Image (cartoon, rainbow, N blue to C red):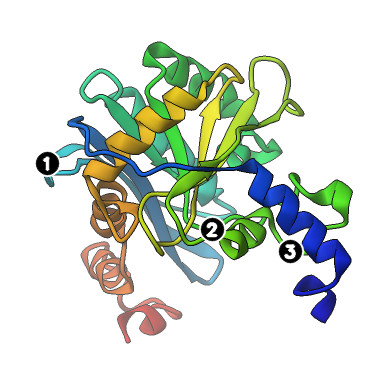
């Protein structure tokens, strides 16, 4: 187990991570930024599922640009797909309104099989203004150092080499096809804050573009994380309490199984 944290292999990976890391102190550049996130919740009664999904687009100043809601009764509903579709719709309605659109999560998950029917819309929306990036607080990807026998995720090694702001050199993945190339970089916006992962569509992104993006993010970030995404997350949560209200409004309170929701 300790081989993850010490030994020649570990040191070799750290050396490579240091070579990949570009130290950069972002400057506060004015830009209008919006964060997009989605949420869903559900409860079941004797095989029937009551579900609700929401997606929001929120500017850093708290202005809500898009607020989408959907709900229904059914069975075997793919809620993650519904939520993804709503996120993309929110993104479509936002790209022309702001300088930078921040999507919560990973572009990889959008391009995986369960979301593949949405791929064309994602690509079209992202290419319209080239102002959409995906941002993830956590990442389990092990692509960058796998040839050195890495055991932990890439982010683990970058966290070990420095506490300074900066970014890793762009890492390009082409496994989804030529129109769905993902270029990613791990970034830290300010000293000793957590590293986050940025994902761009396409491979043609210069270091200057990354620096410019960091400058825009830095202006409206709290604790190294874009404030617009924090607002989006807080605005789209569907609590069990809200689901319980739906149960009551739909007259399902007396159904067997609904007591769990109503507490």
For mark 1, what is the residue?
63
Q: Quadrant of residue 233?
A: bottom left
Residue 165 coordinates in the image, percent (x, y): 42, 51
Residue 51 at x, y percent in the picture? 41, 57
Q: Quadrant of residue 27?
A: top left
Crowd rating for badge 2 (residues with CA inside 10 Å; few <14, some 14–19, many 20+): some
* Secondary structure found at label 3: loop
Q: How many marks?
A: 3
Secondary structure state at the residue bearing disc 2: loop
Whichever of callouts 2 and 3 sits on the residue coming sooner in the sequence is 2
Whether 146 is drawn above or below 253: the answer is above
Image quadrant holding the C terminus, namely: bottom left
**Tag 3 residue:** 152
Query: Would residue 33 be found to the left or right of residue 210 on screen?
Result: left
Q: Residue at x 29, y 54 (%)?
A: 236
Residue placed under numbered mark 2 in the picture: 138
Residue at the spot 35% in from the left edge and 54% down from the top edge: 190
Crowding at dot 1, Cα within 10 Å, few <14 / some 14-19 / many 20+, comes out as few
Judge the density around disc 3: few (<14), some (14-19), many (≥20) Cα neighbours within 10 Å.
some
Q: Quadrant of residue 139?
A: bottom right
């Amino acid at each position: 187990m300790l081989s993850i944290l010490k030994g020649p292999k570990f040191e070799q990976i750290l050396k490579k991570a240091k070579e990949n890391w570009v130290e950069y102190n972002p400057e506060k550049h004015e830009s209008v930024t919006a964060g997009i996130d989605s949420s869903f919740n559900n409860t079941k009664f004797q095989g029937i599922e009551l579900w609700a999904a929401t997606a929001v687009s929120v500017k850093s100043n708290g202005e809500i640009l898009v607020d989408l809601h959907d709900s229904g009764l059914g069975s075997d509903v793919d809620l993650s797909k519904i939520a993804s579709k709503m996120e993309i719709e929110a993104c479509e309605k936002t790209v022309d309104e702001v300088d930078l659109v921040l999507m919560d999560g990973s572009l990889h998950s959008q391009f995986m099989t369960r979301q593949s029917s949405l791929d064309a819309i994602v690509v079209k929306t992202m290419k319209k203004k080239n102002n959409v990036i995906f941002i993830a607080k956590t990442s389990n990807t092990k692509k960058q150092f796998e040839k050195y026998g890495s055991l932990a995720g890439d982010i683990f090694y970058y966290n070990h080499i420095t506490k300074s702001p900066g970014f890793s050199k762009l890492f390009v993945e082409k496994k989804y096809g030529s129109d769905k190339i993902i270029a990613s970089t791990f970034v830290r916006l300010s000293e000793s804050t957590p590293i986050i992962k940025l994902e761009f569509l396409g491979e043609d992104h210069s270091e200057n573009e990354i620096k410019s993006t960091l400058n825009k993010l830095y202006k409206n970030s709290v604790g190294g994380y874009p404030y617009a995404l924090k607002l989006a997350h807080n605005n789209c949560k569907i609590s069990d309490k809200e689901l319980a209200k739906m149960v009551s409004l739909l007259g399902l309170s007396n159904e067997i199984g609904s007591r769990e929701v109503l507490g």
